[in-house]
Amino acid sequence: MNRTALQASILVLASALAAASSLPAAAQHTVIQAENVRFDYAQVLRVTPVYQTLRATTVEQQCDPEPAASENSRLSRVVGAVREALGRERNPKPSTGENCRPVPVDREFRRPIAYDVDYVYKGARFRSRLPEDPGNKLRIRVAVTPVITPISTSR
């Protein structure tokens, strides 16, 4: 290494040491404290599912039954009318497709997307929304952090 490169390296090192010595003592020594965390179980009191409602409309073919030629008697028409009025027509007549029409049919689907969970831990009640039903016990994370008041700079 030549002499000018050595002098430049010493100059950089000296300026770094001078800058470090001008910092306050607290900034020179940083202490990283381990987090005060532990895990425990809470008793689940109630689980309420949160539902998403989906609506869909489809078009289906609806066909009216065709009357048979033998049903033209008065007695069969009266019995058919009574069954239809009571909603108990057991065997609707098959359709040939001539009297069919498209009909929109609305359908509604509900599915659970989350769960509101009420639980108690050390006498205190809590509520959280979770993606799954936790069952009777809920594993929780307990963290303790001290409250530090800022030091007043004015005297």
Image (spheres, rainbow, N blue to C red):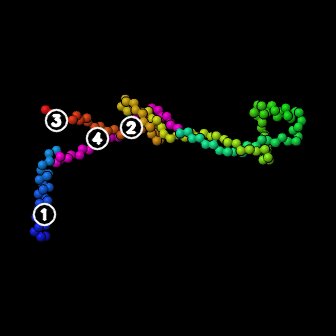
Highlighted range, magenta: 27-51
Question: Which badge, 3 or 4, is on the more N-terminal residue?
Answer: 4
Name the secondary structure under disc 4.
loop
- Quadrant location of the N terminus in the rendered image: bottom left
The mark found on residue 8 in the picture is: 1
- Where residue 70 appears, x then y in whole percent? 88, 40
Q: Position of residue 17 (x, y in %)?
A: 12, 54
Q: CA distance from mark 2 to mark 1?
A: 62 Å
Q: Earlier in the sequence, mark 2 or mark 1?
A: 1
Say if mark 3 contacts mark 4, CB within 8 Å.
no
Q: What secondary structure is marked by label 2?
A: strand
Instruction: Compare marks 2 and 3 and give the one earlier in the sequence.
Output: 2
| Label 3: which secondary element | loop
Q: Position of residue 154 (x, y in %)?
A: 15, 33
In the figure, residue 144 lies in which quadrant? top left
Q: Residue at x 38, y 39 (%)?
A: 140
| Residue at the spot of label 4 | 36
Q: Position of residue 57 (x, y in %)?
A: 63, 43
Q: Which residue is mark 3?
A: 153
Instruction: Tell me if residue 137 can be seen.
Output: no
The magenta stretch spans residue 151: no
> What residue is pinned by disc 2?
41
Q: In the picture, which quadrant includes the C terminus?
A: top left
Q: Amino acid at mark 4?
A: Asn
**From the viewer's perspective, is 13 left or right of 133?**
left
Q: Nearer the viewer, mark 2 or mark 4?
A: 4
Callout 1 amino acid: Ala
- Residue nearest the observer in this picture, 65 or 120: 65
Specify whether residue 15 is in view. Answer: yes
